[in-house]
Image: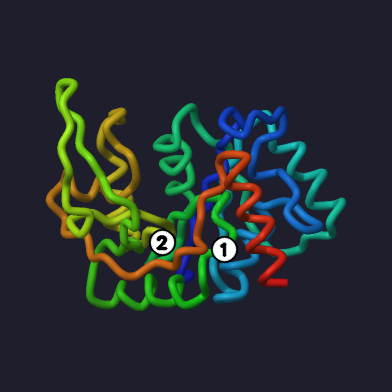
Amino acid sequence: MARKSVIITAGGIGKRMDSDLPKQFLTLGTKPILMHTIELFYQFDETIEILLTLPADWRGYWETLVEKHYFRIPHLVISGGEERFFSIKNALRKVTGEFVAVHDGVRPFTSQEVIKLCFKAMEQHQVVVPVIPVRESMRKIIDGNNHAVMREDFKLVQTPQCFHSSVLKTLYEQNYSQSFTDDASLAELMKIPVHLISGNEENIKITTRMDMLVAETLFARKK
């Protein structure tokens, strides 16, 4: 059994990016965003099991990109479902690792330290989630009224979110609900403690044109 696995979800269709091409396939530098993301985990551990969920209609396009860019990192492609929940559920049928990370395909700037800390914490915790502080002031709106809240009471959630494989598979035995915003929310529903670690601020999720501008700046600086 492979000790570590990662499920990389790439089910976006480009709505918020206002693009005909799904955001995970947009070029960052000289290759698609998704390839950068996969490389993060291969760089961390060349033996890690990589499972990639893609919309069924785009699997052929991905295969074309793989050949075009001579992309040779081993990975298993799995057809996604209508919702992220069903994509991950499909992938879990193929997972063999003892520890499993779930990561957004459009987060190509996760630090190696965060990935390392995520899997390291698996030795003591069942669910591990990276978070970063809220920098802006916040207000809560209820029934048309609003009031200030303490930003120190909130954190912004990132991926990868890491789980014991047996725990994650149990979580996905639940029926789907629109209230499931991420994998940690499933754990919370089942009263499983969620352990937080420090994420890295560069670990943005590229979903809009503004995100893409930031990503290009980060990539240029990294290069």
Q: Determine the secondary structure under disc 2.
A: strand
Of the residues shown, which amino acid type is indicated by label 1?
Phe
Q: Which mark is residue 109?
A: 1
Between 92 and 29, the residue placed more toward the observer is 29
Across and down, in percent, residue 112 comes to 52, 75
In which quarter of the view is residue 48 placed? Answer: bottom right
In which quarter of the view is residue 189 placed? Answer: top left
Between 169 and 37, the residue placed more toward the observer is 37
Between 177 and 13, the residue placed more toward the observer is 13
Across and down, in percent, residue 144 comes to 18, 21
> How many callouts does the rendering have?
2
Between 181 and 199, the residue placed more toward the observer is 199
Give the Cα separation between the discs numbered 2 and 1: 19 Å
Residue at the image position 74 percent from the left and 43 percent from the top: 62
Of the residues shown, which amino acid type is indicated by label 2?
Val
In this picture, residue 22 sits left or right of residue 187: right
Q: Around disc 2, counting alpha carbons within 10 Å, would you say few (fewer than 14), some (14 to 19), or many (20 or more)?
A: many
The residue wearing badge 2 is: 100
Across and down, in percent, residue 173 comes to 28, 40
Q: Determine the secondary structure under disc 1.
A: loop
